[in-house]
Amino acid sequence: MFDKYMICEDTVRNVVKDGRVAGFELGARLPYYRGLGLSMVEDVAVSVDGEKIQRESVRVTLRGRTYTLDEMETEYEDRWEMGEVATVTVLKPGGLNAGPHTIELVERLRVAYLPFPLIGRDLKQVTVG
Amino acid sequence: MNAPHTVKRGVSLYSFQEEYFLRTMTLEQCIAQAAKLGAFGIESLAEQMMPGFPNLSDDFYAKWYEWMQRYRTTPVCHDMFLDTKKYKDRLLTQEECIQSIERDLKHAARLGCKVMRVLVFVAPKLLEKCIPLAEKYDVKMGLEVHAPWHLDHGWIMGFMEMIERTGTRHVGLIPDMGIFTKRLPRVMRDRAQRSGATPAILDYVCAEYENRTLADYVIFEVRRMGGNAVDMAFAEQCRHNVWSNPKRLLEFMPYIFHIHAKFYEMLPDCTEYSIPYEDIVPVLIQGGYDGYLSSEYEGNRHIQDAFAVDSVEQVRRQHEMFKRLLGER
């Protein structure tokens, strides 16, 4: 529904931790017209230049709280609100090389009234400085 | 000219989801915008525009009432959801479902809403168990009759049977006017074309929909024509959209206490491309409908790939149409 807004423009950047580039992050939204409890967010899949990032390397941060995707599956209180921008961090030593990249974000949601999973997909060309 | 009537105008803030999503409008601005159009009945979705739900503060509710006063608006309807798939390994139990519905009834009552929209997938036997709660909070539970369901669908008949058997005044229907989609929305057709569908096949499907050809036959024919994946998905629209004569509403009128005025595309002349409100509104007046026509704009998702979405203008046009059809000037 809101697939084209999933990856926020101009938010992709490398993350430096303890003096090293530990990975990269991007601002991300759900493709859905309402907020959802985190236990119903089944997957937040990131690919860079066609290469899929391991699920274990993805973190989602909402209002200062950071989750692994497995932790989200058993989080029954916190929500990812409609249009709320979460920080999706990809742990990848060295991060992204400077220059253009293709980032793909696929989010899979478990929505009660749909017989199938709701899958949102966004693909954006970004340039890392 | 017009007969006296009690049809009122309102807006479901669902209509402004594109603007709210992108944070170009706040909840307060959505309410103010409805009021500006003289649409004083407010329908809201807590899970959309009230972050933190179900744990909203007293301050939030106080602010809500301030807004209602400031803009002279009336809280009309709260739209519930029910996360039956909250847990990965099991569905909610019936008891958990009832607790979730009570949570929403409580919220509706705190907002000052007399009506709560219930999703069509909620089963009649579950809703029947919630009647005492609806009575306690004095909020009517309205089942949303949403395409591809329709008033004469077997699933809806199950609710009618339950309503009549229990004699409850706290369960009824909220027909979504998408059940009167006379021709397929043009915004859907054009979106399919931009996504790679075959124009001649799209035209064929639209024509067959208007001929009321059985959906299965249309889908079969499109497959025979060599339709691609997008063509096939568009042919499926013959299943997802439905039409019947709006006069069917008359028989159900005693059970209808709210209406979703669904629309996909308001044209510059303030008519809707696919849903004939010219035929619907007079039926509501004739039937003595005493409630709101609550705008529900759902065209954004079909145009946002190629065009700027202007929900405010779309809702404005719909209310110009309602004013005309309700004899407001």
Image (cartoon, helix red, strand yellow):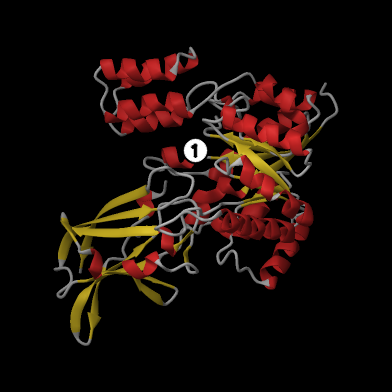
- Residue nearest the viewer, comparing B3 with B58: B58
Q: Where residue B22 sits in the image (x, y, percent)?
A: 47, 56
**Residue at far right of view:** B4
Q: Residue B196 lies in what quarter of the image? A: top left
Amino acid under label 1?
Answer: Gly
Q: Residue B285 lies in what quarter of the image? A: top right
- Residue nearest the viewer, comparing B23 with A23: A23
Quadrant that contains the C terminus of chain B: top right
Q: Residue B315 lies in what quarter of the image? A: top right
Residue A44 seen: yes
Residue B113 seen: no
At horizontal 76% and vertical 56% (from top left) the residue drawn is: B137
Residue under pointer 1: B299
At horizontal 21% and vertical 62% (from top left) the residue drawn is: A127
At horizontal 42% and vertical 46% (from top left) the residue drawn is: A1
Please state if B279 lies on the left or on the right of A53 as rendered. right
How dense is the environment of label 1, judged by Cα within 10 Å: few (below 14), some, or many (20 and up)?
A: many
